[in-house]
């Protein structure tokens, strides 16, 4: 069983747009996922602008990568290090903890993540 940050079964993050490194709706990770796309986050205007300002445009569609471009309110499996970078810049988006992979805890504690839990 793949686990979330609570040690329970990982829930899906989003199927529309279809997210995840494997584009299966889950924040799964593996050896080929060098970005560690494990954080299920709800996009905000502030985060999307921040991400673009540091060189990762998440708003422009890229059909070759099955990437629709994101809008505020979309749920998306973010790279763990990008979420932490946004956290340090005070623009981290809210997180769906039940859909966030346990590997996230390798770099940030559950106590901190809970502060960003989506209601």
Image (cartoon, rainbow, N blue to C red):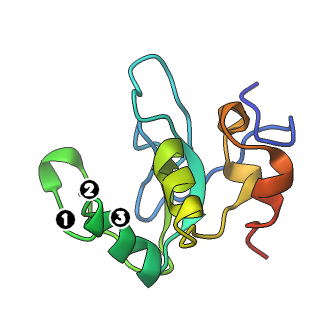
- On the image, the x and y values in percent for residue 84 come to 56, 52
Quadrant where the C terminus is found in the figure? bottom right
Q: For mark 2, give the secondary structure.
A: loop
Q: Nearer the viewer, mark 2 or mark 3?
A: 3
- On the image, the x and y values in percent for residue 6 come to 86, 42
At 57% from the left edge and 60% from the top edge, which residue is drawn? 88
- On the image, the x and y values in percent for residue 113 come to 76, 55
Query: Which residue matches tag 2?
Result: 67
Along the horizontal axis of the image, is 66 left or right of 8?
Answer: left
Give the spatial CA distance, label 3 vs label 1: 15 Å
Give the spatial CA distance, label 2 vs label 1: 6 Å
Residue 61 - label: 1
At 54% from the left edge and 44% from the top edge, which residue is drawn? 80
Query: Which residue matches tag 3?
Result: 51
Viewer-side residue, 30 vs 91:
91
Residue 62 location, quadrant: bottom left
Tell me: residue 35, above or below residue 50.
above
Q: Earlier in the sequence, mark 2 or mark 1?
A: 1
Contact flag, marks 3 and 1 (Cβ < 8 Å): no
At 41% from the left edge and 39% from the top edge, which residue is drawn? 21
Give the spatial CA distance, label 2 vs label 3: 15 Å
Residue 18 location, quadrant: bottom left
At 86% from the left edge and 35% from the top edge, which residue is drawn? 7
Viewer-side residue, 49 vs 7:
49
Q: For mark 1, give the secondary structure.
A: loop
């Amino acid at each position: 069983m793949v686990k979330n940050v609570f040690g329970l079964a990982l829930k899906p993050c989003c199927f529309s747009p279809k997210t995840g490194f494997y584009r299966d709706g889950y924040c799964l990770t593996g050896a080929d996922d060098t970005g560690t796309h494990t954080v299920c986050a709800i996009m905000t205007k502030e985060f999307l602008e921040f991400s673009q300002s540091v060189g990762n445009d998440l708003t422009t569609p890229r059909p070759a990568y099955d990437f629709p471009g994101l809008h505020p309110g979309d749920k998306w499996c973010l790279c763990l290090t990008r979420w932490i970078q946004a956290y340090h810049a005070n623009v981290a988006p809210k997180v769906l903890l039940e859909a966030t992979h346990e590997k996230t805890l390798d770099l940030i504690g559950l106590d901190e993540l809970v502060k960003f839990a989506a209601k």
